[in-house]
Amino acid sequence: MSDELKIFSGSANVPLYEKICDYLSIAQGQITVERFPDGECFCRIEEDVRGRDVFLVQPTCRPVNDNLMELLIMIECFKRASAGRITAVIPYFGYARQDRKDEGRVPITAKLVANLLTRAGADRILTMDLHAAQIQGFFDIPVDHLSASPVIDHYIASLGYDADETVVVSPDEGSIKRAAQHVKTLGGSLAIIDKRRYGNRVEQANLIGGPIEGRVAFLFDDMIATGGSICGAAKLVKQMGATKIYLAATHAVLCGNAIEQLRNAPIEEVVVSDTLPLLPEHDLPNIRVLSTAPVLAEAIKRIHNNESVSRMFKQLPYGKFGVYS
């Protein structure tokens, strides 16, 4: 396999791809991705990639099916062009919430997507903050699972609050491990919200841990979709006496009435990353977008050089990934 690293992108998140290439000081790969009048996707590689180590940057965000199909076609195209190794860089992995059979006669779509990517010809997957970590086991190829926590924690720390005046809040039981990791890095106490689901209705019933009253609260989650759960958690924390509330999540899915929910929530700031591009309708005066490009770029470099990715966060300085805009 050639030592030359090549990075290409689909149409899902070009700004993030450009930041990755800038960070690595590498030229952007030449590729044409178009749509035929009937909506079919067409891909043509505009340079030689035979034997090259190729990375394809494409989150499977909205429109999910179009971006997923585009990624599959790109992988197939590079496979037929005899690329040496193909790594699909998927900052946001769509269909991740369909990771199990929680009732009868439903699919495990996350597994189906894993099979599609593998069958298309991907040799490796690089992704970030999967909704369910066990999705890594759905693949029969190596998966590097990154976290945006260093970027988010660096920004939260830059706000200058003392640990004894803060509390990290897990919006539900499933996010306890994530919240505990943020406490380990940032300090402060830990609180957990007991979330109950009644059909399509979600209710924040109780709060465990704390204390909350008189403290600055940080609510962390992997994504903000409709915003119902995390905004409901923010309202409960406010009722419990928090002085300021910050929401932080890796993936700004922001669908449905999420923007309205966030506007009406008692929060100081919404902190998200650039794994997904913000749309014009996502304009919020108190939204802060942090760049994950340094994390992804460092991982790409290490994969290319056959170095440890998991050791990356231990070896590099704490502020290395603290790049935000």
Image (tube, rainbow, N blue to C red):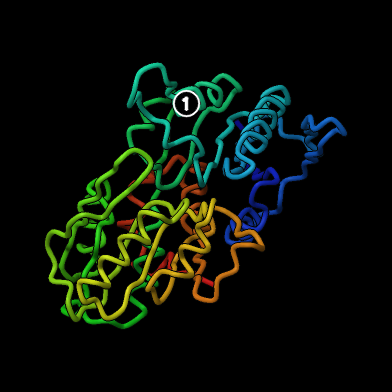
Q: Amino acid at mark 1?
A: Thr
Quadrant of the image occupied by residue 183: bottom left
The residue sitting at 51% across, 38% down in the picture is: 94
Find numbered disc 1 in the image and state the secondary structure of the residue it sits on: helix
From where the camera sits, is residue 2 visible?
no
The residue sitting at 41% across, 43% down in the picture is: 307
Q: Quadrant of the C terminus?
A: bottom right
Q: Is residue 160 above or below residue 15?
A: below
Q: Nearer the viewer, residue 138 or 313?
A: 138
> Residue 244, image x and y in percent?
31, 78
The residue sitting at 45% across, 39% down in the picture is: 306
* Relative to 152, 37 lies left or right: right
Q: Nearer the viewer, residue 33 or 315?
A: 33
Quadrant of the image occupied by residue 230: bottom left
> Residue 282, image x and y in percent?
59, 63
Q: Quadrant of the N terminus?
A: top right
> Residue 218, image x and y in percent?
30, 68
* Relative to 300, 76 lies left or right: right
According to the picture, the residue beneath numbered tag 1 turns out to be 109
Q: Is residue 262 above or below residue 45?
A: below
From where the camera sits, is residue 62 visible?
yes
* Relative to 151, 290 lies left or right: right
The residue sitting at 52% across, 67% down in the picture is: 289
